[in-house]
Amino acid sequence: MKNYSLTAILLIGLVTPGFAQTPEEIARHEAVMNSPAAQQMQLNVMKQTMGTLWNGNGLNPMTMELLQQDGIREGVGVSQEQVQRIQLTMQGIGDNMPNDPVVKPVREELERFMHETQGGPFAPNATEETQQRFFELQTNLQMTVHETALGKLQNVIQNNLTPDQLKKVREVQIAVMSDNPIVAPGMFEALDLTDAQRNQLDGIKKELEPEFKKNVDQMAQMQWKLQKKVQGEVGKKLESVTDPNERKKIVEETVKKIQESNPEFRQEMAEIGESGKEIANKLKSRMSEVLTDEQKKRMTDLIDNPPDFIKRRRGMITNSSQTGGEWRPGPDSWKPGDPIPAEYIEEQKARFPRRQ
């Protein structure tokens, strides 16, 4: 099965048909895609993606990450068939994303620019203005794709799970809110909020948003550094590997090696995780002020006395953190803001815009 993750549809391949490359063209491509403008483009997309969790309804890529864990899936009463339906639907949406009515005009605008400039920033005599315009259009395309895909994912999850299952999924998110680097306030819908309480939650989010954005900025920077390290490590290893599972395995092993052999990187991850936990705790404290006694008791029970399947998940996280492995962001996971997979970046070196 094809990779149906959101990162798989954030790709420059949406707009870049391939042609034979010369060493000069390869060098030019690498220089453009490693430029500060390219870095800023990816950082903006990562931050936008993580921000959707803060403002969403609690149904997001992290929901799918939870449902792909057998213990969690079974605990909330979701069948494997339901998860597979969601995955297959999202795969189809990803395959059709270039021609989505919202995405298509944005993609075509970028394609026209590439045609009119005979290759955009990859042309031999591309100006700084041309490069800047390319990254503006490419950022717009990627953000449009992300926003569209996330909206569709929410609908697909909602259409494939029952109201009781949706409530239990959000209850799991409440129970593990301090275990995740990014918190999704939409999870509090599990407590049957009133309209007045939703308005109060919106006010709390506005108060905490500066801290959230700071944490997201740090996480995006860290993800970018991870992406670059992985890309550098993988290098030519993937050039002769055609099996997608083997390519994925090589990248995942590289990510693990980098994380385990780099104390500074692990420390940075831990600090970001602590910042996320602090935001979650502040959110929990502020929500305690607006919940009824019954709602507050339910929230406290979920956090302090969760079902066994949640306790087991916490135990796995604890054991992982003891070996310096807490929160391992992977290139093929459902975690929001993950970098574009390194193996795909390597593939894209063979996908320049065709000169007319």
Image (tube, grey):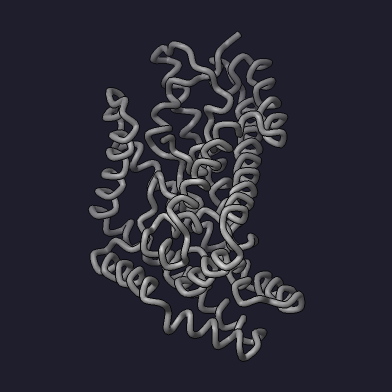
| Residue 211 appears in view | no
Between residues 306 and 277, which one lies in front from this camera angle? Answer: 306
Q: Is residue 186 left or right of residue 330?
A: right
Q: In the picture, residue 202 is in which quadrant?
A: bottom right
**Which quadrant: the N terminus?**
top left
- Is 268 rendered above or below residue 242? below
Residue in the picture at 47% in, 60% down: 78
| Residue 352 appears in view | yes
Q: Is residue 276 left or right of residue 70?
A: right
Q: Is residue 125 left or right of residue 104?
A: left
Q: In the picture, residue 353 is in which quadrant?
A: top right
**Which quadrant: the C terminus?**
top right
Residue 253 on image: x %, y %: 26, 44
Residue 183 on image: x %, y %: 53, 66
Residue 174 on image: x %, y %: 51, 73
Between residues 209 and 124, which one lies in front from this camera angle? Answer: 209
Q: Is residue 190 left or right of residue 252?
A: right
Between residues 134 and 67, which one lies in front from this camera angle? Answer: 67
